């Protein structure tokens, strides 16, 4: 049947009801295929994230937070050129290019958004290897930026991966997307009157995590060590550990004061007090699952025990629900 008649037919079936009758009459796979004709799950996930609009918020005189299609992005701007922390997902590239151009960055590319005149993007910093933080490395490097990251970001991006819980597969990134400059412990950058301190935190969300401190603006980019107001993802397959997340939160807290603006990898801008709440939630969650595991409970039995029932109201409204987070913690203890 043509797509037109299929649409008609699906509309009719939807009118019949979204309940058991329609379920019985339309094979599930067919219904799914009608919605997503060609995409594999990883492409669909990228497209879903990439469709989110970019929101802009000033963090300081020459520091801007961009939120939406991927991990939170922070842009330092000025006459020295732009420094961009994280790069959103690939489908968001036109929007990111536009945002950078409006901040004075000539991010290059066809159509030349800001290509004429604007200060170039000098540096890109990756907080870790995940696609929703590194996808636009390649076009930014092609436009002249040097990509700086932990050595494990380069290593992990060079390998194929399966992300547990999300059940998504990622092929190795192309060479053009890999960082050109890597470090293992600490790296500092100075530009536009600001001093950036990049610090590796031992295995936490992954084994490639970097936090970025903007000294003068008193802003801390936590990367995915911190999901504000929601359960975080922890990538056990590339070295992530829940206890490392707690230790990394403590390290972030030791670098923050009551005036520090903390940018989480995901979620709204946070204060030190917000990070304290998150750290306490992680600690409670880890203790409870550790006890279940120590008493011999399997992953399935631990999920069935609903150990986070009282936490879900505050933390379970993001991508990962209580049951998902039991699994995430269980697999990374
Ligand atoms: Zn991540």
Image (cartoon, grey):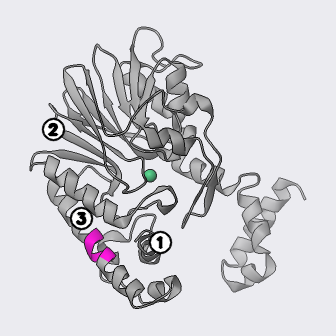
- Coordinates of residue 198 in the picture (x, y in percent): 29, 37
Q: Nearer the viewer, residue 38 or 182?
A: 182
Residue 302 to residue 311: above or below: below
Q: Quadrant of the N terminus?
A: bottom right
Residue 168 to residue 16: above or below: above
Structural distance between the alpha carbons of marks 1 and 2: 35 Å
**Mark 1 CB near ligand 1 (8 Å cut):** no
- Which of the numbered marks, if any, corresponds to residue 99? none
Structural distance between the alpha carbons of marks 3 and 1: 19 Å
SS at mark 3 in the image: helix
- Residue 100 visible: yes
Number of other residues with Cα within 10 Å of mark 1, as a class: few under 14, some 14 to 19, many 20 or more: some
Q: Earlier in the sequence, mark 3 or mark 1?
A: 3
Of badges 3 and 1, nearer the viewer stands: 1
Q: Are marks 3 and 2 in contact (CB under 8 Å)?
A: no
Q: Nearer the viewer, residue 271 or 21?
A: 271
Residue range in magenta is: 282-286
Q: Nearer the viewer, residue 71 or 146?
A: 146
The residue that mark 3 highlights is: 279
SS at mark 2 in the image: loop
The residue that mark 2 highlights is: 218
Residue 194 to residue 270: above or below: above
Q: Residue at x 79, y 67 (%)?
A: 30
**Mark 3 CB near ligand 1 (8 Å cut):** no
Residue 193 to residue 51: above or below: above
Q: Earlier in the sequence, mark 1 or mark 2?
A: 2
């Amino acid at each position: 049947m043509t797509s037109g008649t299929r649409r008609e037919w699906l509309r009719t079936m939807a009118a019949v009801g979204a309940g058991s009758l329609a379920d019985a009459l339309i094979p599930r796979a067919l219904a799914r295929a009608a919605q997503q004709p060609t995409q594999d799950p990883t492409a669909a996930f990228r497209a879903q994230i990439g469709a989110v609009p970019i929101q802009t918020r000033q963090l300081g005189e020459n520091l801007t937070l961009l939120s939406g299609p991927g991990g939170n992005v922070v842009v330092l701007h000025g006459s020295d050129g732009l420094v961009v922390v994280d790069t959103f997902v690939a489908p968001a590239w036109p929007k990111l290019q536009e945002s950078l151009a409006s901040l004075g960055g000539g991010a290059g590319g066809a159509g030349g958004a800001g290509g004429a005149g604007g200060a170039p993007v000098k540096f890109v910093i990756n907080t870790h290897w995940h696609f929703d933080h590194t996808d636009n490395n390649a076009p930014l490097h092609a436009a002249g930026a040097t990509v700086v990251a932990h050595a494990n970001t380069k290593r992990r991006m060079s390998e194929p991966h399966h992300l547990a819980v999300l059940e998504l597969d990622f092929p190795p990134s192309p060479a053009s997307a890999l960082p050109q400059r890597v470090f293992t412990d600490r790296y500092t950058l100075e530009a536009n009157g600001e001093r950036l301190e990049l610090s590796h935190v031992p295995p936490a969300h992954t084994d490639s995590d970097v936090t970025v401190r903007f000294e003068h603006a008193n802003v801390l980019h936590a990367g995915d060590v911190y999901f504000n107001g929601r359960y975080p993802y922890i990538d056990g397959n590339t070295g992530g550990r829940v206890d490392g997340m707690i230790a990394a939160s403590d390290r972030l807290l030791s670098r923050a004061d009551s005036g520090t603006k903390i940018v989480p990898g995901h979620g709204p801008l946070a204060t030190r007090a917000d990070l304290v709440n998150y750290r306490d939630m992680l600690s409670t969650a880890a203790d409870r699952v550790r006890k279940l595991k120590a008493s011999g409970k399997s992953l399935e039995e631990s999920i069935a025990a609903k150990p986070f029932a009282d936490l879900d109201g505050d933390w379970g409204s993001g991508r990962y629900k209580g049951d998902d987070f039991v699994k995430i913690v269980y697999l990374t203890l």
